[in-house]
Amino acid sequence: MKIAIAGATGFVGSRLVERLQQAGDQVLILTRNPTKAKRVFPDAAFPNLEIVAYTPTESGPWQQALSGCDGVVNLAGAPIADERWTPERKQEILHSRKLGTRKIVEAIAAANPKPSVLVNSSAIGYYGSSETATFEETSASGNDFLAQVCQEWENEAQQVKQSGTRLAIIRTGIVVGNGGAIAKMLTPFRLLAGGPLGSGHQWFSWIHREDLVNLILLTLQRSDIQGILNGTAPNPVRMNELCHILGQVLHRPSWLPVPDFALHLILGEAAQVVLEGQQVLPKRPLEYGFEYRYPTVKPALEEVVSHG
């Protein structure tokens, strides 16, 4: 296959590129920073890789590069919880996803021959937050900022079906792996200062990076997989349980909770990403017969710590 990837240098995208390379597939990377991409993917280790510079929110010559690709994976978007949500940051979070997806859909519509499939990222923030509800792919959307972002993001991706291209949207949970959100939690635990964030009762719907990459690969390969898929493990946990298990795996205490107000001081409104959760189940991946390497959180965390 020849697969185009936007967001390839990120935590998930970089592993996806490695796996495609190992399988002998050709990879075309759409990147704002070709210099960084060449550093992440050196020629010697990635001989089947082509790097194309692009501005995600603007039309341009880069769009012609999608002609002849078998599939497109769109993982691009400004980081959600890295800084405070100023009005300008909120606009960047929304526009990077909404306009970035629109331009990829435009490129697919103009491509000849067209890619047969678009795998577009979304997030479980679509459902809003709840300590009591359980969400599946058919559940209604929430009404907070992240739910709005996901709705507009997905609406742009839906337009690709007008080109006859198969669409799969993966609503991703918190990705567990050697890096990402969990890596930020390891340091305080190792310094004997780890514990639950906020109340500890909020749900933590997660997926190991390897499982998410496998789900993307399966979706690229199987023409019967389409529509909405929850990119989460089948066994979400509450924050208290996550931190208890993380303490066990690290052989460190997990008694020092981080209060809500401290996170609000640091992150402002963006603190809702970690203070509010949702219990999200991957009904459709399981219906398609997807097999998880890490269905429960303890082996997933053990794998992360063993490489940390």
Image (cartoon, helix red, strand yellow):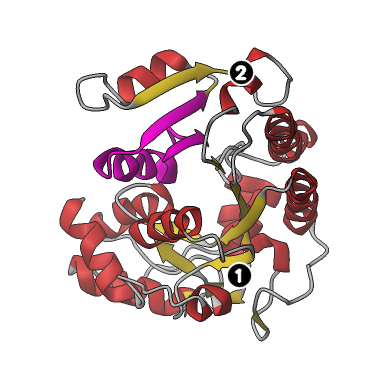
**Where does the image place residue 141, in percent across and percent down from the top left?**
78, 68
Residue 69 can be seen in this image: yes
Q: Nearer the viewer, residue 8 or 66?
A: 66
Q: Quadrant of the N terminus?
A: top left
- Give amino acid for label 2: Trp
Q: Give the spatial CA distance, label 2 vs label 1.
A: 38 Å
The structure residue drawn at horizontal position 70% and vertical position 51%, both measured from the top left corner, is: 269
Span shown in magenta: 1-30
- Give amino acid for label 1: Gly
Q: Label 1 near label 2: C-beta < 8 Å? A: no
The answer to whether residue 231 is above or below residue 108 is below
User: Which is nearer the N-term, disc 2 or disc 1?
Assistant: 2
Residue under label 1, please give it. Answer: 277
Q: Residues within 10 Å of mark 1 (few under 14, many from 20)?
A: many
Question: In the orientation shown, which residue stands out farthest toward the right?
Answer: 143
The structure residue drawn at horizontal position 38% and vertical position 49%, both measured from the top left corner, is: 184
Q: Which mark is residue 62?
A: 2
Q: Magenta span has 20?
A: yes
**Where does the image place residue 32, in percent across and percent down from the top left?**
55, 20
The structure residue drawn at horizontal position 44% and vertical position 68%, both measured from the top left corner, is: 257
**Where does the image place residue 129, in percent across and percent down from the top left?**
69, 70
Compared across the picture, whether 290 is left or right of 97 comes to left
Q: Magenta span has 147?
A: no
Compared across the picture, whether 157 is left or right of 219 comes to right
For numbered disc 2, what is the local secondary structure? helix
Q: Residues within 10 Å of mark 2 (few under 14, many from 20)?
A: some
For numbered disc 1, what is the local secondary structure? loop
